[in-house]
Every structure is written in structure tokens, then in C-alpha cells.
Amino acid sequence: MEAAWLQNEDNMKVQEELVAAMLKSAVSECSEELTFLKRDPASLKKVEPPFDRMKYEEAMETLQKKGLSVEWGSDLGAIEERALTVDSAMPLFVVNYPKELKPFYMKENPDDPRTYKNSDLLAPEGYGEIIGGSERETDNELMLERLRDKGEGLDSYKWYLDLRKYGSVPHSGFGLGLERIVTWVCKLEHIRDSIPYPRTVARVYP
């Protein structure tokens, strides 16, 4: 999803409402199937906005207290995401990641210029990230500077930069991992179980 006139907080509210609507539909239309998969539909009914929120720096402190070897600048992988949510019944937004961990097109966080105005939504029960989103940068020159600092060839991004070249409006967006949310909702053991034809080390096609 991409929408104009949305800041990052508004963007997260859309994500919350979308996930809640998906869960409501799943419970009302597929309760029997969820029960068969050993997912209690009543547990999904309890997942309603607002979802929990935690700054990236708080996440690092929480993980360190749990004995994980992380520090500022560490990315959150499956192990870290699971540690943050395994005991929770509510999805968790981790917000304001360091710039070096995320793409150049995200909006700088004015409260902490080391970070972006972004979020990852982690599913409860240790299922990990299901949505990634951010407010988007509208300053064309700033994005050019970031790309040069990373040593990126500008030709590859010309079409994207042209969208901002003559001005833009505040906007935000996100991407939802369909198989990831199905894995959580259906209480599956592995994301491969949510994909009809998963890619593995032994099979790329089909």
C-alpha cells in the first residue's frame, strides 16, 4: 500500500486496521479450518488495535536482558524477533530502525537523525515480521546524497528519483508478507507450509 498525506503513525494505524480486518474475516469465515489446524479462533478475536509499540533501541535493551548478543546497529533476524514476541498475544511494532539497516527512500526521524520513521510489525507468539513500512523521503537531493554515499549507480533509480524531482507530498507505505501472516494465523510450523510451491535448496521450479 502507498498513500498520500499519511505520516508513519497514520501508516501504522492502517496496518493495524488491515490486520484486524483480516483476522475478523478469517474467524467468521474459516473458524472450522482454524480449529482443525489447532488455532483457537477466540485467540485471534482478541487481537485488536492499538498494537504494542517499541522503539528499536528499546528492542536492543530487551534482547540484551534476555542474553542475546546484540547492540545498536544489529539487525533483527528470526531469533531476535522470536525473542521479542514469543510470550506475547498481541502484534508488536518495532519503530525507528537505524538508517544503515533500511533502504534510502525512508524519511529521516527528526527526533533521532540516526534513524528513519519506519516500522516492522512482528506477529505474536514468536512468528516474526509480517509487515514492513515507513514514511517516504520527499527530498530528491537527500536521496541522491544517500545513494552516492552507498556507491549506488544513479541510473538504476532514475525513474524513482524522477517521481520526486519536481516536488512531492507527505506519503507512507508498507508491504505485507501474505505467506508470513498465513503462517501465524494458521499456527503453522514453517512458512513453507503456507506456500503451495515453496522454493527449497533442491527445487527452484515450479
Image (cartoon, grey):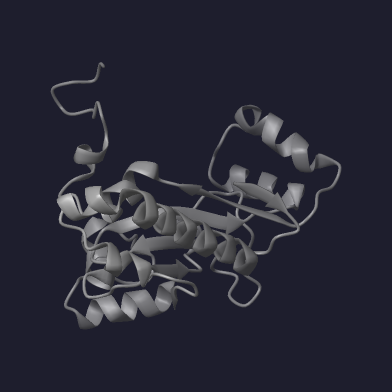
Answer with the quarter of the image where residue 113 lies. bottom right
Relative depth, front residue between 178 and 43? 43
Residue visible at 54% across and 67% down in the picture: 115
Horizontal relation, residue 30 to residue 137: left or right:
left
- Location of residue 199 in the rendering, given as x and y in whole percent from the top left corner: 23, 28
Residue visible at 31% across and 49% down in the picture: 30
- Location of residue 11 in the rendering, given as x and y in whole percent from the top left corner: 60, 61
Quick check: can you spot residue 176?
yes
Residue visible at 75% across and 48% down in the picture: 141
Whether 116 is drawn above or below 68: the answer is above
The quadrant of the image that shows the C terminus is top left
Residue visible at 21% across and 61% down in the picture: 79
Whether 58 is drawn above or below 202: the answer is below
Horizontal relation, residue 194 to residue 73: left or right:
left
- Location of residue 78 in the rendering, given as x and y in whole percent from the top left corner: 24, 56
Whether 16 is drawn above or below 194: the answer is below
